[in-house]
Image (tube, grey):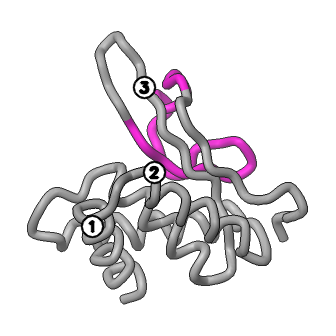
Amino acid sequence: MQAGVTMLLTIAALRATPLRIILSATRYLNEHAPRAATRDEAHAIIHAARRAASRWPGRAACLETSLTATWVAAFTGRAVTWCHGFRTQPYEFHAWIEVDGRPVAEPSTTGVLAKTLTISPTPRMESR
């Protein structure tokens, strides 16, 4: 349920707010989460975000699901790294989450994307 409500919030924000403000809010949430998410927690969160996206009647692709997952993590006191990247052959943009520098629940091809932007947890955090 939390992922569904957060998906609504994310989609509304993406439609009504400049991306720079959404990314600033994401950075703020990550900075104020008490600890970094574990891989298992991040897997559960991204899968919940994807389930919520599958029920959305409109577009809810990688940007929406990765931001939703990042916000759900923060709302539950965890932080993940949010990433955006691209490749040129074939041309593709993608957004995803990472824990400990590794993409969570992503195909191996995500590793070939050049990261253009990351929002990481604060360095004082440790996974438990």
Q: Which residue is mark 1?
A: 11
Residue farthest to the bottom, as pictured: 1
Q: Which residue is mark 2?
A: 20
Where disc 3 sits, the SS reads strand
Q: Amino acid at mark 2?
A: Arg
Residue 29: give x, y in percent of width and height.
Answer: 62, 70
Where disc 1 sits, the SS reads helix
Of tags 2 and 1, the one toward the viewer is 2
Q: Quadrant of residue 41?
A: bottom right
Using the image, determine if residue 48 lies above or below residue 19: below
Residue 81: give x, y in percent of width and height.
Answer: 63, 52
Residue farthest to the left, as pictured: 57
Of tags 3 and 1, the one toward the viewer is 1
Q: Residue at x 71, y 75 (%)?
A: 33
Q: Which residues are magenta?
A: 94-114
Mark 2 vs mark 3: which is more N-terminal?
2
Mark 3 vs mark 1: which is more N-terminal?
1
Residue 113 is a magenta residue: yes
Using the image, determine if residue 17 lies above or below residue 29: above
Q: Amino acid at mark 1?
A: Ile
Q: CA distance from mark 3 to mark 1?
A: 22 Å
Residue 9: give x, y in percent of width and height.
Answer: 33, 77
Quarter of the image with the N terminus in it: bottom left
Using the image, determine if residue 98 lies above or below residue 114: below
